[in-house]
Image (cartoon, coloured by chain):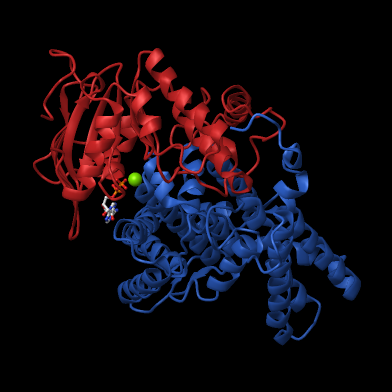
Chain colours: A blue, B red
Amino acid sequence: MSEKPKNNRVAPPSFLRRYGSQLGIIGVGLVMWLGFVIAAPTVFMNTFIYVAFAQTTPQFGIIALALTFVVITGEIDLSFPSIMALGTAIFCLAVTHGVPWPIALLLGLATGAACGWINGFLVSWLNIPSLVITIGTSFLFRGIELVIMNGTGVPLTAEMYPGLHALLRESYFGIPVQTIWMIVLLGATWLLLNRTRFGAHVFLVGDNPTSARLMGINAVSVKTRAFMLTGVVGVFAGLMTSIYGYYFWPTTGDGFLLNTIASVFLGGTSVFGGTGSVIGSFVASYIIGAINAGIVSAGINAFYTQLCFGLVIVISVVLQTIIDRKIRRQSITGR
Amino acid sequence: MAEASPRPGATPVIELRNVSKTFGEVRSLSDINFAVYPGEIVGLLGDNGAGKSTLVKTVMGFHKPDPGGDVFFKGQKIDDWSVARARGLGIETVYQERALCEKQPIWRNMFMGREPRTKWGLLDVKKMREESARLMSEHMGFTSAAVHPDNVVTTMSGGEKQGVAITRALYFDAQLVILDEPTMGLSLTETKKTLDFVSNIKKAGKSAIFIDHNIFHVYPVVDRLYVLDRGKVAGVYDKSQISMEELIDRLYRVARTGTLE
Ligand SMILES: Nc1ncnc2c1ncn2[C@@H]1O[C@H](COP(=O)(O)OP(=O)(O)O)[C@@H](O)[C@H]1O
Ligand SMILES: [Mg+2]
């Protein structure tokens, strides 16, 4: 309300300030890739490795895109690996009972939505911390899945389900369809987050839930929808993973938790809520996928994978935080 | 006493009847009867903790009255009152706590909860940015280059933040504007601007509820005054009935004894 322009604030936020963390993560990705190329040129000049990681990365990467919404609202979902398994189990039960696969697919995705709704209801309506309650629902969903499948798996070969394999396992124009899905979902989630009222409310609710509610935003509904999105995409990823291995394992989802969550945080989405980007999660997923594929293919001992993961994640998150505070002209410790 | 209507026969824009609000053990409002008529500015006075903000949030539909209390909009009893509904019907509020999302750019704050959409149903981000820039230069006196709509609110001064909250309430062309301690922490010029803003609401033929601790701010701009004490309406006055000196005198008495007379 002051009359005179403030000289220290005459400019719009710089490009760096607005896109700093996204540029940072892309930079980390490029540097790491160059490192791999220099360390093992024969492997990393060969397209085989790129095909392999373009097939496997989206299996958790698409969940990272959806989980970004939950994290921006200031919550976390630790139950998505179990939702992947439960939704895929429902799909398998349906097809083994003669239901046509497209309908079974819808049933599976609906299961994911229902699981997400339960998470969202408990977190936002009953106000239970998501970190706690999604550990509980994780056991619950996994338990239901193990009971209804009786612990057994289901074969999902290309001969039995050619349509599903065309949808989730083939390559088109030389690009594995998994990565095509990842790009399509990046576009869809970017639009949803940045160009819809729902997306706008995701940011506002995560930033300050009381302010958002005072201005008439239904925080319960916004959070619930974010959890449902993660549930649905989780089941889609569960099917993609199972079709990739030609088999549904009752343990589907094991090993997905940390890769996915690391992708979201590495991508610059804040654990405090209110800020984040799906582009960051997208790039970070491929970085994490590349470490996996790269280390194995380069013939480096797989024991180094976790070491490498740890270094990349810790260093980039620390750098991101420091750069962010520098841009905001805060001290390095943020105090 | 509280039933005294300034213009017999007129229908209030908003009316609370027998409204109480309890939070656990705390009774913040008891048996409130409160009305705002078209074109009038109503002042709300009372000590800290008297229940002014709670009353405002009940008017907005943020708090639901305890069973037995009712909210009327233009004479119609409304059961599913909510902030979204209230804003849709033309009631905007500058909350005491400002209700901003500080990590977000100004344009997201300006249109929070009422985001414009294009004909495709997508968020009209271009319009949000442009309108924010225009509003900031026209209404807040920021030159448009000074505070860019893409700047996040955290970096702004207290007065600038309040400017965003006030401009937001103004933008939607509300018929009732509620201001809960809008001058708190503002400089002299900023305070004067805010008071001018309240007078302009009246000139535009709209209504307002104005809460401020400073009686020298409230008295000159209002038509009618409610005095709240410990969750109860302790008195309602037409400005013509009471001078500022009498009012100050009574407010001291209320604070000491709990009654006005
Ligand atoms: N959400 C809430 N939960 C519990 N108590 C509340 C809440 N909001 C207000 N109160 C209590 O209600 C009383 C009135 O508060 P308030 O309406 O903010 O007063 P005022 O705005 O007149 O200073 C205070 O005792 C306050 O502690
Ligand atoms: Mg108050």
User: In x, y percent, where is residue A209?
Assistant: 42, 51
Q: Is residue B184 placed above or below B226 in the rendered structure? A: below
Residue drawn 77% across the image and 67% down it = A49
Residue B15, image quadrant:
top left
Q: Quadrant of the C terminus of chain A?
A: bottom right
User: In x, y percent, where is residue A162?
Assistant: 53, 55
- Would residue A140 appear left or right of A315 to someone viewing this image? left
Res B64 visible: no
Q: Quadrant of the N terminus of chain A?
A: top right
Residue B83, image quadrant:
top left
Residue drawn 52% across the image and 66% down it = A242
Q: Is residue B101 placed above or below B250 in the rendered structure? A: below
User: In x, y percent, where is residue A110?
Assistant: 37, 53
State the count of labels: 0
User: In x, y percent, where is residue A190?
Assistant: 59, 44
- Would residue A147 appear left or right of B170 to someone viewing this image? left
- Would residue B159 appear left or right of A250 to someone viewing this image? right
Res A135 visible: yes
Q: Which one is in front, B167 or A114? A: B167
Image-quarter location of ligand 2: top left
Residue drawn 49% across the image and 36% down it = B165
Q: Which one is in front, A101 or A319? A: A319
Q: Which one is in front, A116 or A152? A: A116
- Would residue A299 appear left or right of B106 to someone viewing this image? right
